[in-house]
Each structure stands twice: as structure tokens, then as C-alpha cells.
Amino acid sequence: MSDQVFHYQYQGPKGQRLDKYLVSRLPELSRSRLQALIQDGFVTVDGLRAHKTGVSLEPGQEITVHLPPVESADLVAEDIPIPVIFENNDVLVLDKPAGMVVHPAAGHKQGTLINAALALVPEIEGVGGERRPGVVHRLDKDTSGIILLAKNDRAHHWLQEQFRLRQVEKIYWALVDGHPPTPEGKIEAPVGRDPAHRQRMAVVPLEKGRSAVTFYRSLERFADQELIEAHPMTGRTHQIRLHMAFIGCPIAGDTLYGHRRSSLPIHRFFLHARRLTITLPGENKERTFETPLPPELAGILDNLRRSIGKHPS
């Protein structure tokens, strides 16, 4: 299959970004797909490869986009049971269990959420033009809860734009070791890769990372732990885990950012994507999706309540 080729003459205002312009001309492609095409040399401006997504355009410039066929990523559909919270023609909302990687990567070629999703909705293959078909946002391997997938490129672009513009409300429940300094608060600390540990993120100076903001509020207090609701305004890697550790309250069971040995009999960290509010493609009102704590986390809370003589809710 040969490339598709699109030609445009730019007639907009001086200084508009190339990637922003292409989103308006090729709305069926996600912004991330278009940015990847630019960076990989598939977009030219006046015959020269652009390479940078933020190229400023001038009226009259000729833009050519070469759209290569989507390469097969050798993804295999696997019949893995996974709860479906909601589905329509555009989206699939799933309740991801802890221990499941979202998409195939080095060391995780099978058994991922995408392998399971391909068995449920084969049409997501190739959506977004990446090796992560349908993926709009991610959860860590050991974070359970709500995750949303796009079933077509139009929906993928629609949903990604809402995440990019921070129009999506994500609510997590976390049990932390210790007690936050206030019943509710705002943590604002830039996040970047830890230079001494490739698997870790770290709070770094803004010029070396990206801005990150998390709001939290206390839901229930125990002797040595506290159940909190976390509302991340940004979506940085490991953001909630890192921010809670930053204020001295690491998530229970998080041996990467917290205690080397878990303070509770738990084989994962206590973090659950509890609720997600978003406007779906073609709709003008927000929808809210929720999922309860999985049994292993609910059981931890019940034991803590019993230890202080409180009836489990």
C-alpha cells in the first residue's frame, strides 16, 4: 500500500504552529499522530522537511503531508476477561485490574489491556496510528480502575484534545502512610526523570521538568494511614505517587517512592482510578464513569476500620 499525499496552501494568520494547522485540516488524525509524522520527516513546508512540530507558518506556504500506511505492530487479540463499564460506537471504558500493563512494550508483549481490548473490539487496531491503538491516557501497571479507549481516529482526536486542554476530571483514591499536613490541599511541584534512577520520576526545577499540580482531600483517617481523594490537574508519569511522597505521605505499598517494606499486607500500591468525567464524541454534556475499589483494597480498609472499632462501610 502506497502513501497517501495531501497538499495544502496555508492562508491563515502569520505565526500559526504547523501541528495546530494540520489538526484543523486532518481532523481524522490525532494530534500525536500528526506530531509524529512531522518529527519523522513526512511533512514538508515549501519542499523542506519540517521536523519540528512548532514551525511557524507564513501565508502562501505550500505544505505537503505524506501519510504512510499503518504498519502492523503484530498485536495479538487475547481473550482476557476485563470488566466493561461502558461502550458505544466511539469509546470503550474498562475497569483495569492491578498488575496489567496498558499496552505492549519491552518485556510485556502479551497479556496487556490492549491485547484484551482487541478481542473485545477488533476495530481499534491502528487507531491513532501507533503501537498503542486506541490509547488516550494510561495507568501504571499496579494502578487499578477506569481507563478509556478510542474506537476510531475521530474519537481519538476528540478525547486527546480534552486531556490536552485539561477538560477531563480524574479522581483517584489512595491510602497513604502518615497524615497530610492539612485535610485538603494543593501540591504544585514540577516532575522530571530522576537522573540517578531510570525507573523513577523526581521533583525537579521547572527548567528540568514539567509543571505538575495535584489537589487532594482527606476521606478517612486511621492511626497510621489516611484515605485520600486525589485530583491531578496534569498527567505526569507517576504524578500522584511522587507528589504524595513529596509531602511525606507515600502511598501504602509503593516501594518505589515509599517504604522499602509495605506498612500493610498488600502486594501492590493502594491507588485506584475511581472516577472519570469527560464529554464523549458528538455529545455536549459530560458523562461520569465510576468503579468501586477492588476487593483487595476494600479489604484493607475494612481491616483498618475494625482495628479502630469502626464498622466497615
Image (spheres, grey):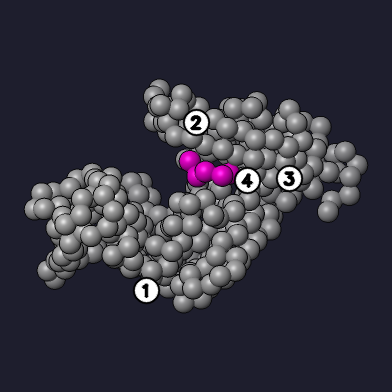
Mark 4 belongs to which amino acid? His
Asked whether residue 168 appears in the rendered view, the answer is yes
Mark 3 belongs to which amino acid? Ile
How packed is label 3: few (under 14 Cα within 10 Å), some, or many (20 or more)?
Answer: some
Residue 171: mark: none
Q: Quadrant of residue 2?
A: bottom left
Image point (36%, 46%), residue name: 107
How packed is label 2: few (under 14 Cα within 10 Å), some, or many (20 or more)?
Answer: many
Mark 1 belongs to which amino acid? Glu
Where's residue 17, x and y in %?
29, 49
Q: Nearer the viewer, mark 3 or mark 1?
A: 1
Residue 231: mark: 4
Image point (63%, 63%), residue name: 288
Read off the residue under disc 3.
Answer: 300
Mark 2 belongs to which amino acid? Pro
Q: Nearer the viewer, residue 22 or 124?
A: 22
Read off the residue under disc 1.
Answer: 123
Q: CA distance from mark 2 to mark 1?
A: 38 Å
The image shows residue 4, relative to residue 224, as above or below, that is below
The local secondary structure at tag 3 comes to: helix
Highlighted magenta segment, given as a residue range: 231-236
Sequence-wise, which precedes: disc 2 or disc 4? 2
Q: CA distance from mark 2 to mark 4?
A: 16 Å
Residue 31 highlighted magenta (yes or no): no
